[in-house]
Amino acid sequence: MNSPAADRARYDRATAHLDAPLALVDLDAFDANADDLVRRAGGKPVRVASKSVRCRVLLERVLARPGFAGIMSYTLAESIWLARSGFEDVLLAYPSADRAGFAELAADPKLAGAVTVMVDDIAQLELVDRARDGGGQEIRVCLELDTALHLFGGRVRVGARRSPLREPAQLAELARAVSSRPGFRVVGLMGYEGHVAGVGDALAGRPLRSRAIRLMQGAARKELAARRAEAVRAVRAVVPDLEFVNGGGTGSVQQTAAEDAVTEIAAGSGLYVPRLFDNYTSFSGRPAALFAQPVVRRPGVGVVTVLGGGYPASGAPGADRLPVPYLPEGLRYDPQEGAGEVQTPLLGSPADDLLIGDRVWFRHAKAGELCERFDELHLVQGDRVTATAPTYRGEGRTFL
């Protein structure tokens, strides 16, 4: 693995003919991260979370590698677009109210065979039926298990508020309701343990909090493994030919893969390795997706100003949702200004070595959200740009 200084020199050489702002993906790092996900999955296929990639060229690249199978999408419109683009196994990870999309899905046998939709409420089935507009294709359905950890008799909840289906009996009841309803077929079960997969357990300078997170995650994994196994048994009693049980995320690949009840793992952020994935004891990856902002001002000693850069990530607002100045090492935000919409001052001794027009390389806090800011990704191998690939945005596809 190259040193940060060597990487900076490579990226500067590779993109010297391009104007910043720009975004790149280091393909050597991307491929190494893909190999690591497969290794951690221990023989179970990895379904790629498209929201963490948002570039069809890179989705095709990773799905061509052994160990990967299928896409986990984030909107119905995206699912249909991907299916029409040739992706044959698309699991929509969130319920939808896209009536036009459901009408299109129900009218096309190829789409209906490629796309699986998420359901956790009978009302969602009723919406699909009202939207069919005469389309009679059978809709493939996945049920979602609530994975949150409940403590102190349910008075404390740890985990995302997603599905209302927590108990195995609830999932079995909905599986029976779907199976008895013409035009639908249960094919899968999903549970995303974001409080384990998406929360780092080694926070720099916070040893007590890190230990508390590890204790919470250990308890959550144990509780969920038992409950998920019971839920799968309950659903299989209704749907013996269940095709898949999906679980996990980048931060919990090996732990979730160890559950016998789980047949496939979901992951996507681990391909780019954004800054939120720096704080894990269970794995480490190589930063693969970066963006560069040009230096446009030198206000004084130890300060430079770059163009733009205020690209916060979704989630609870906080400093951890901001991009981080990455290369050269040692730059930091001005606490009075932070990351700006049009300009961003950066402090630190490395600023004195930067000239007008030089680049500062940043890492985004989350993976695919970087692609909502750029039309294209420059794909770098060694010190050359070997290709340029459009992002979803670059293809005119902004789904959310």
Image (tube, rainbow, N blue to C red):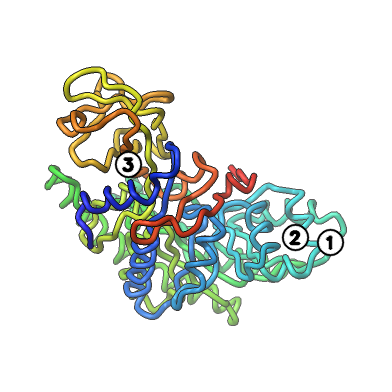
Q: Residue 150 location in percent, x, y?
A: 34, 53
Earlier along the polypeptide chain: callout 2 or callout 3?
Answer: 2
- Label 3: how many residues lie within 10 Å, few (<14), some (14-19) or many (20+)? many
Under mark 1, the amino acid is Gly
Name the residue that disc number 3 marks. 361
Mark 1 and mark 3 lie on one chain; the one further toward the N terminus is: 1
- 248 to 361, vertically: above or below: below
Q: Do the residues labelled 1 and 2 touch (CB within 8 Å)?
A: yes
Q: Relative to 324, is 160 on the left or the right?
A: right
Residue type at mark 2 is Leu
Q: Position of residue 152 (x, y in %)?
A: 28, 50
Separation of marks 1 and 3 at Cα, in angstroms: 50 Å
271 up-or-down from 342: above or below: below
Q: Quadrant of residue 243?
A: bottom right
Task: List the residue tagged with mark 1.
Answer: 135
Q: Give the mark toward the camera: 1 or 3.
A: 3
Who is closer to the viewer here, 272 or 154? 272
Q: How crowded is mark 1: few (under 14 residues within 10 Å), some or many (20 or more)?
A: some
Residue shown at the point (58%, 49%) measured from the top left? 392
Q: Is mark 1 on a helix, strand or loop?
A: loop
The label shown at residue 105 is: 2
Amino acid under disc 3: Trp
Query: In terms of depth relative to the viewer, which is nearer, 271 or 5?
Result: 5
Looking at the image, is mark 2 or mark 3 nearer the viewer?
3
Q: In which quarter of the image is the N terminus?
A: bottom left
